[in-house]
Amino acid sequence: MYIIIVGGGEVGFYLSKEFVEAGHEVLVIEPDSRQRERLEEELGDISMGGEGCRIKCLDEAGVSRADVFVAATDLDENNLAACQLAKLKYRVPRVVAKVNNPRNRNIFRKLGIEDTVDVAALVLENLKAQIPVFPLVRLLNLDEEGIEVVQIRVTEESPLSDRLLGDTSVAFLAESACLVRAGSKPQMVSDSTSLQAGDILIGVVPADQLERVRTEAGVTGLTAA
């Protein structure tokens, strides 16, 4: 595949490295000569100078033949403009934007850029996954499929503690969840699985069931992000 990445900072650098190592053709658009030098030293001649939200630059980059277009700069307005051009003018099949300010995510969606990665939300959820006080962590959001991958920690105060999974309102997790329990190997769950304080469930949840899971996990007063 031909993949264009706008922005050669940390995200752009490591993303391009992954694509190059996987054998894909990659071009990084980056105005900063120092960032381009780093890319050249590590990954070879895969960058060009310019602004990824400029039509002239995108024409030179050959965006019209790109399979994937990723805007990963630190400026949301530039990422939005670049993605709109890639999607609407050049008809790139897959367009993804890095969102630096969580408040801007809805703006991207309203303007037609639905595939976004909220950097702040990713950091937050990963931190929460390491802190036992948070009973529910959203690990992965798959908007197109209408599902989320979540981590549920069974605490002593949790409505799930000392109950059979099949007797709870989230019994549907028996179809898709994995149980992680200290001292034991991870195992698939069933309706007859007895949950204990300290257990961790990793499961796939339909987006319309997320609030039910929040309540059953013991999370109150919260809404989905």
Image: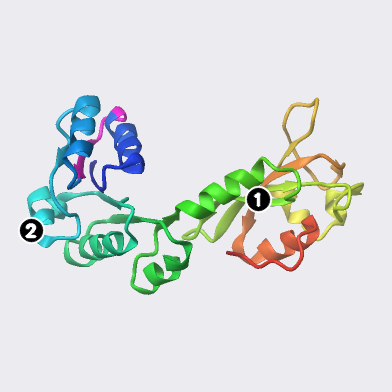
Q: Position of residue 135 (x, y in %)?
A: 74, 51
Q: Position of residue 170 (x, y in %)?
A: 77, 57
Residue 28 within the magenta-colored segment of the rendering: yes
Q: Quadrant of the C terminus?
A: bottom right
The answer to whether residue 136 is left or right of residue 31 is right
Instruction: Give the label on residue 122, or none.
Output: none
Vertical side of 133 occupied by 17: above or below: above
Instruction: Give the label on residue 137, or none.
Output: 1
Q: Position of residue 23 (x, y in %)?
A: 26, 30
Q: Which residues are magenta?
A: 21-29
Q: Residue furthest bottom?
A: 110
Q: Quadrant of the N terminus?
A: top left
Q: Secondary structure at mark 2?
A: helix
Query: According to the image, label 2 marks what residue?
Result: 56
Corner quadrant of residue 35: top left
Q: Amino acid at mark 1?
A: Val
Residue 139 visible within the image: no
First of labels 2, 1 by sequence position:
2
Residue 181 within the magenta-colored segment of the rendering: no
Q: Secondary structure at mark 1?
A: strand
Seen from the viewer's position, the closer of residues 128 and 201 is 128
Vertical side of 217 occupied by 189: above or below: above
Seen from the viewer's position, the closer of residues 50 and 204 is 50
Q: What is the CA distance from the residue labelled 2 to the residue labelled 1?
A: 43 Å
Corner quadrant of residue 52: bottom left
Q: Position of residue 182 (x, y in %)?
A: 79, 30
Q: Residue furthest right?
A: 162
Who's the residue at 17% across and 66% down the image?
A: 89
Who's the residue at 20% across and 26% down the image?
A: 41
Q: Amino acid at mark 2?
A: Lys
